[in-house]
Image (cartoon, rainbow, N blue to C red):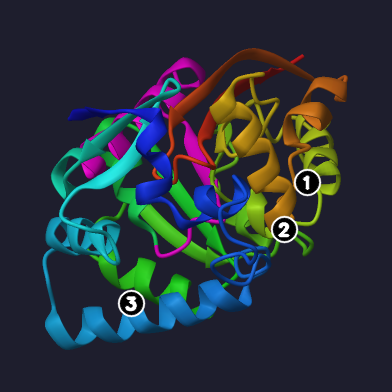
Amino acid sequence: MKSFPLDELPAHSSWATYLLGAVDKPPRDPDLFTGTETYEKIYEHLLESYRENSPSYEEFVRQTRGSGRNEQSLVSIEEELFLVNDAELVKRDRTVVREALSPVLDSGETVLDLGCGWGWTLGAITDAFPDVQVVGGEYSTAGVELARELHADDDRISVEEFDFYGDWDLLDAVPDDEDTVVFTKGAFVTLPEAGPTVERFEELVQAGDLQAGAHLEQVGPHPETVLGIIRERYAQERGYSMDLLDHLEDASSLTITDTTYDVLGDNPLHPLTGIQWQST
C-alpha cells in the first residue's frame, strides 16, 4: 500500500470536489444506493457475467471488487489514505471481516450474514472460521442466485431470500442446538433507519435465539477533522442512515463490547466502523 496525501483527495474523488465547493452539482444521483433497485441491477449484471465466463471464486471476487476502479484504488484505513491494488483490497476486505467476527465467535456457531449481497462475505467467513456454519440472507433475487452458485460446493453455506422488514424465515435454517451470531457489512445504507432491525435483534436475544452481533457499517460519529467533516456532509448529501450505533447503545438487551472507526473505507468518504455486541 502506498500512502496518499489528504490534500490530493479531490483529484481522486469527484464527490470530494463537489463537497468542497469546487463544482455546483453532485457527480451522480445522491439517492442511487439508498434502496434496493440499484443493487438488483448490479447483481443481475454480475450473475450474467459469472454464468458466461465461469471464473473461479477467487478470480470472480478479485474482478468484482476491482470493477470500475483504476489500477490502484484510493482507500482509507484508520483515517489515513492509501493507494491499493485489487489484491491488496481483497486481502484487507477479508481481514476486516475476520477481525469483526473473531471477538464474538468461540466455535461451532451459525453466523447469519444479513444483506449478504452477491455472497462474497459468506466465503470470507467460512475461510476464516472453519468450524462455523453461515446462513446468508439477501433481498435481491439475483444476489441470492449468484451467492448460491458461487458456494454450491460448500455445504457449510446456505443462502435464503431475506427482507429486513419481513418474517426472517431464514432462522429456520439454523439448528436448534447452535448459538447464533448476526453479521452485516454495508447493509444498513439500504435501510431508512436501523431502529426496527435492532428491535428484531432484541426480540431474538430475549427469546434465546441470538447471542451476539458483529457489524461493519458506515456509521458516525465522524471526528472533527477535515476528512471527518467531509464524511459527515457526504452521508447527509447521500441520505444514508447513520443511526445504527445509537440504537444499539439504547438496546437494553444488548451490550456493545467494542467499536473501531474506519477499519476500511473502500470509499474513503464512507468508511466502515467495526461494532461488536453481546447479549446482556
Reply yes or no: does residue 193 show up in magenta.
no
Residue plotted at (27% across, 63% down): 64
Q: As shown in the figure, which amino acid type bears the numbered disc 1? A: Thr
Magenta stretch in the rendered image: 89-118
Check whether the beta carbons of the residues at disc 2 and disc 1 lie within 8 A of each other: yes
User: Circle 1 — which element?
Assistant: helix
- Within 10 Å of disc 1 (Cα), the crowding (few <14, some 14-19, many 20+) is some
Reply yes or no: does residue 111 show up in magenta.
yes
Residue plotted at (81% across, 28% down): 246
Q: As shown in the figure, which amino acid type bears the numbered disc 2? A: Phe
Task: State left or right for residue 35 relative to residue 93.
Answer: right
Q: Looking at the image, can residue 118 be seen?
A: yes
- Within 10 Å of disc 2 (Cα), the crowding (few <14, some 14-19, many 20+) is some
Q: Horizontal and vertical percent for residue 233?
A: 69, 42
The residue at which mark 3 appears reads as 46
Mark earlier in primary sequence (2, 1): 2
Q: Nearer the viewer, residue 208 or 214?
A: 214
Q: As shown in the figure, which amino acid type bears the numbered disc 3? A: Leu
- The correct choice, above or below, for 162 with respect to 223 in the image is below
Q: Horizontal and vertical percent for residue 81?
A: 35, 30
Quarter of the image with the N terminus is top left
Q: Nearer the viewer, residue 213 or 58?
A: 58
The residue at which mark 2 appears reads as 164
Give me the C-alpha separation between circle 3 and circle 2.
23 Å
Give me the C-alpha separation between circle 1 and circle 3.
28 Å
The residue at which mark 1 appears reads as 197
Residue plotted at (77% across, 14% down): 280
